[in-house]
Image (spheres, helix red, strand yellow):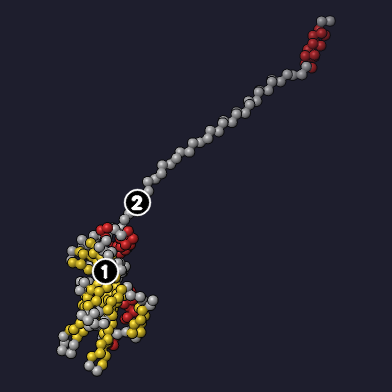
Amino acid sequence: MRTKPLRLLLLASLSLPLLADPPAPTPAPAAAAAAVPAVAETAPTPTPTPTPVPTMPSTLKLTNGTVLHNVTVVRWMKESVTVRHTGGADTIYYNYIAEPDRTTVKAARDDAIKNQKPDSASQLADVAVKGTVLVATEDGSEVPLGGAKVYAIRMDALNELSTNLTRVTLPKPLASSVTGADGQFAMVVPAGEDFFIFAKATKFVGQSWEYYEWRVPITQVGDRQSVTLSSSSMVPLAEQKAVSFSN
């Protein structure tokens, strides 16, 4: 019969394994891109900003409210500055200058002393001090006093003479001199120092010794080439001190 071979053929075809679709090819991993070394950009070197030079203010305000105008420096000192202004000329302690002017003035002082500016040469020159010591006589006249010892002492030591102590030790003098028979003295004080003139002397008058002492801040002296220490500026005997100096 013809139908059997057909059935066998059909069964044979059913027994064959089913063929699956071929797997899709796995793509190869992408090759890593070659590392390109980064070129570092060199930052431009900033131009250094110059340090501003301290400038003396043309206007100064003091702690008491006073304002000085058109200020120019005459002389720098450690504790004070002598200035000219619209009203005249004055020596002003830095502590009496109101902030922020005080800080500016001190910076200008330090810069002037450090750099020895040509325009400040006269301000920083050593100070020549000359003068005469006079004492009163019984008739009220003033006569020169020879042999008086005259010193320039740092200003901050003046407070030590204001205590109740009868004996004090002062710092080593900045300069010293002894008056001649004409009562005159001369000495040179280092530049930039703020000082007072201190003088002592004794003289035998009649039947007893007389004792003399002077303490004059240089800021109170109008002409340093013509200082006068007289009976009017003498320290009273009860306030005079026995003084020694440190080495």
Q: Is residue 160 left or right of residue 186?
A: right
Mark 1 / mark 2, whichever is N-terminal = 2
Residue 113 seen from this side: yes
Q: Nearer the viewer, mark 1 or mark 2?
A: 1
Residue occupying the point 74% across, 19% down? 18
Q: Toward the viewer: 177 or 74?
A: 177
Q: Look at the picture and state if 103 lies above or below 212.
A: above
Q: Amino acid at mark 1?
A: Val
Q: Toward the viewer: 33 or 157?
A: 157
Q: Look at the picture and state if 38 lies above or below 95.
A: above
Residue 134 seen from this side: no
> Label 2 belongs to which residue?
50
Q: Look at the picture and state if 68 lies above or below 203.
A: above
User: Dot 1, crowdedness within 10 Å: few (<14), some or many (≥20)?
Assistant: some
Residue occupying the point 15% across, 89% down? 139
Residue occupying the point 26% across, 69% down? 127
Using the rendered view, name the quadrant where residue 124 is placed.
bottom left
Could you tell me residue 207's position as x and y percent? 24, 94
Using the rendered view, name the quadrant where residue 30 is placed.
top right
Q: Is residue 179 left or right of residue 12?
A: left
The label number, if any, that marks residue 225 in the structure image: none
Residue at the outermost top position: 1
Could you tell me residue 16's position as x and y percent? 78, 16
Q: Look at the picture and state if 205 lies above or below 216.
A: below
Residue occupying the point 71% across, 20% down? 20
Could you tell me residue 46's position as x and y percent? 39, 45
Q: Amino acid at mark 2?
A: Pro
